[in-house]
Image (cartoon, grey):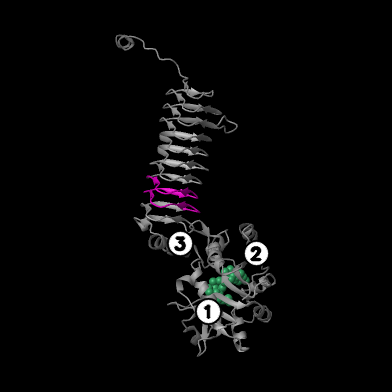
Amino acid sequence: MGKVGAVILAAGLGKRMKSDVPKVLHKIANKPMLQYVIDAVSPVVDGIIVVIGHKKELLEEYLRGKGLGWSVQEELAGTGDAVASAYSSLGGYSEVFILPGDTPLVTTDTLKGLKDKFYSSGADLVVGVFSPDDPSGYGRVILDTNGRVMKIVEDKDATEEQLQIRDVNAGMYMVRTRLLGEIIQRISNNNVQGEYYLTDVVEMLYNEGYRVESYRMEEVEAMGVNNKYELSVAYEILRKRKLHELMVDGGVIVVDPQSTFIDMDVKIGRDTVIHPFTFVEGKSVIGGRCNIGPMVRVINSNIGDGVLIRENCTLEDSVVRDEAKVGPFAYLRLGVVVKERAFVGKFVEIKKSTIGEGSKVPHLSYIGDAIVEEGVNIGAGTITCNYDGKKKNPTVIRKGVFIGSDTMLVAPVEVGKYAYTGAGSVITRDVPPYSLGIARAKQRNIKDWALRRKNK
Ligand code: UD1
Ligand code: MG
């Protein structure tokens, strides 16, 4: 067995999307549908070539740096032409998959099944076949008495009789690369659409005595997304699939799947409870025994074990370590690290800062560009004044510090270990370790002031 490649066809116009964005770059759960096909086939191949054409600059930009190859189809002259344009990139592969770029529901299991069929049957070509209730629009698959594929007739070219056939072509194939190369040169565009049909390869191979097998697959996996309604249908299916996998395979408790939105690449540990109206997005990872939500949004963040994220929090590109507590109403963004057993409470915004082990920011604070070491208590209403109008400046709060309520920490500034700041202080200079920094007007009480006011 040599190396196996995949050609993903993504040059088409996608007119029905009514969009300036190429069809295959439309996102489902924050991931382009092309990427779903790439992710599904990657585990069963050694390399991938994407055929691009329409809006190719945008596709190139997306594909760059991902370890994938691409080839450009100059003119969109049909699926046969698309494959021919990629052929020169396939030299290293003895077999190739050919897949459409707009079928985000196809799974690795199915592609593996197709591959197994290819090798176990000794086929030269395997065609993915399914039988929808309504076959219209698809190429009809004509099988011989041995269940081998004799030919595929496109909907527009089919006779009345052929149109009755329910077996249709999924547009997914595996084929010997060299054979494909020889035959693809010989297809013509002599058909109703004037296109070079990849499907013509089937009849040519069959007639020349090659073995063309079919592989049965579920209709849902072959579903192509052609407009924005179908995009939402695909999302609903993928969303349910992901929730099912999390609950059944992963042991995650999803209280209300109807109102829970979890992106495909998210990982969640067992016995974690996801409460309603919660969104977990991108490459987020959540450990076990956590309680998340209700009404929480976690974006590209990493949450440890036994973490509590209470209602109405947003976490973006942040890390929350084991047994920490966040919220309600907290916003963590841009590389925040909340360390073990720390607590970030009500109406607190934290940006680009580290909150040390067991430290507490319980209420109404803004902490930006700060390092807060372990065992620190930050009083309500504390603000790091990190921005001087030109640049962001750092604040350092050493271990065991007690920041009095409503302290303004005018950065750059450092509060030394075990020091205190007096409530309401505007701290503009460093506070040495073990000291009290106090910077506020001294109180004076004016005797009988209120009485005099009243008698005026
Ligand atoms: C194709 C099959 C049909 C099958 C159906 C399954 C052919 C001739 N027909 O029809 O038998 O039932 O898929 O969905 O192959 N593309 C290019 N360059 C082109 C034309 C298309 O890259 O010049 C790409 C498209 O972007 C798309 C894929 O190839 O990802 C399939 O093309 P499409 O036009 O959708 O083919 P269908 O008419 O649906
Ligand atoms: Mg199509």
Asked whether the viewer can see residue 456, the reply is no
Q: Which mark is residue 235?
A: 3
Check mark 1 vs ligand 1: CB closer than 8 Å? yes or no.
Answer: no
Check mark 3 vs ligand 1: CB closer than 8 Å? yes or no.
Answer: no
Residue under numbered circle 2: 69
Q: 392 or 25: nearer the eye?
A: 392
- Image check: 112 left or right of 262? right
Question: Residue 251, located in which quarter of the rendered image?
Answer: bottom left
**Magenta segment, principal secondary structure?**
loop
Residue 312: percent from the left, percent from the top? Answer: 39, 44
- Nearer mark to the viewer, of 2 and 3: 2
Q: Which residues are magenta?
A: 281-310
Q: Quadrant of ligand 1?
A: bottom right
Q: CA distance from mark 1 to mark 2?
A: 26 Å
Answer whether residue 380 is magenta in the image: no
Residue 68: percent from the left, percent from the top? Answer: 63, 63
